[in-house]
Amino acid sequence: MRVPMRRAMTNLDRRSGEDRRSHKRRNVSIAVEWDGPEGRRSGTVSDLSETGCFVLASGDVEPGETLSVLLPLGDGMKVQVLGEVRNMAPEIGFALRFIEPSAAQLDVIKGLMAQYGGDE
């Protein structure tokens, strides 16, 4: 019995075939906490830019919902950043677009991109 081959997934916009991201992003692996409708949960940021991130986590979230992600500063300190869920993949995670991050929050995000970031 033959098993059909799966097509490779890409980071393209499924609707237009183009990458929708307008800012540089970094592949990262940063343990975070996030607050959603089910309370505080843990996850891993796998993709980070100045405008948003992708959080690997299970949880019940919906596009358009506002969540907060707690990014690590070191020594147990964290900075909270609000974001809107842009899309989600059940049992995989969700894309979050940051909502008007402050200059201090952007400094933290840029620092994490530099510290943990791999290739774009």
Image (spheres, grey):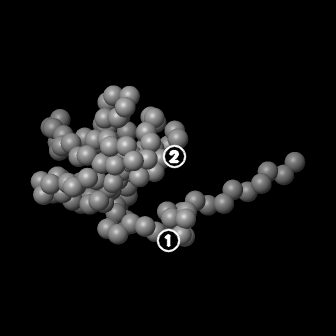
Element class at badge 2: strand
Q: Amino acid under label 2?
A: Ala
Which residue in the structure is indicated by mark 2? Answer: 89
Instruction: Name the residue at 44% across, 34% down.
Output: 59
- Mark 2 or 1 closer to N-term? 1
Q: On the image, which quarter does residue 120 sit in?
A: bottom left
Within-10-Å neighbours for mark 1: few <14, some 14–19, many 20+: few
Relative depth, front residue between 76 and 14? 14
Instruction: Name the residue at 26% across, 60% down.
Output: 50
Which residue in the structure is indicated by mark 1? Answer: 18
Q: On the image, which quarter does residue 32 sit in?
A: top left
Instruction: Name the residue at 31% across, 35% down.
Output: 35
Element class at badge 1: loop
Res 111 seen here: no
Residue 28 at x, y percent in the picture: 35, 54
Q: Amino acid under label 1?
A: Glu
Left or right of 63 in this view: 110: left
